[in-house]
Amino acid sequence: MKLKKIFENIDFVNRYQSICEKYNDFDNRMRDSTKQIQKEVLDSFNYKYKYVSNGSFYQIKEENNEISFSLHMVIKGGVIETLFFLDVDGKTIEPQGRIDFFPEDLGIPFERLKCGALPKYGSEEELKEILKEIFSIYEDLKKEFVKQLEN
């Protein structure tokens, strides 16, 4: 599987870097967003998710034939940490984990620290906008992985 090509095809680095640069106000982040606010925002999207309390993250897990996609989001203190996991035929595909480390793992230039690495939200609306962009990347990743496996 040509993982680097998948991430290049969806313009992952520019898209994720853009989110981090646009939503990077650390001092004015929404430090006290509640699970209720987070759930209301997540409910506005068409995903089945669950909250994993022992890891303090929201999980979206989807199956497509032999492929298992899993998106984890730690939403805490006005910061969103996004993790992506992929299993094909029961085997874990690398890279996995925090998506801001993927470019480095794949040898794609990305100035992780310059753009703040993790998006920050100062309002419920910003949280919704960030998640909208992250879900767009997630959907494109799923499509590219399926396309790659079909070829």
Image: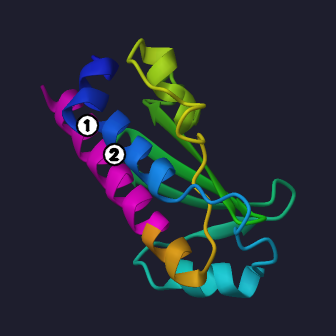
Quadrant assignment for the C terminus: top left
Magenta region includes residue 115: no
Q: Name the residue under label 1.
A: 11
User: What is the distance, in whole Å, between disc 2 and disc 1 at their CAs?
Assistant: 6 Å
CB atoms of marks 2 and 1 within 8 Å: yes
The percent position of residue 99, horizontal first and vertical second, equals: 53, 37
Quadrant of residue 33 within the rendered picture? bottom right
Q: Is residue 26 left or right of residue 55?
A: left
Q: In the picture shown, does residue 89 fall above or below 84?
A: above
Which structural element holds mark 2? helix
Q: Magenta span covers which residues?
A: 130-151
State whether residue 96 appears in this view. Answer: no
Q: Residue at x 51, y 17 (%)?
A: 105
How are the residues colored?
rainbow
Q: In the picture shown, does residue 13 fall above or below 40?
A: above
The percent position of residue 121, horizontal first and vertical second, equals: 61, 68
Q: Mark 2 points at which residue?
A: 15
Quadrant of residue 1 within the rendered picture? top left
Q: Residue at x 78, y 65 (%)?
A: 77
Q: Tag 2: residue type?
A: Arg
The disc at residue 67 is none
Q: Nearer the viewer, residue 143 or 92?
A: 143
Q: Which of 83 and 116 is in front in this view?
A: 116
Q: Is residue 96 left or right of residue 4?
A: right
Which structural element holds mark 1? loop
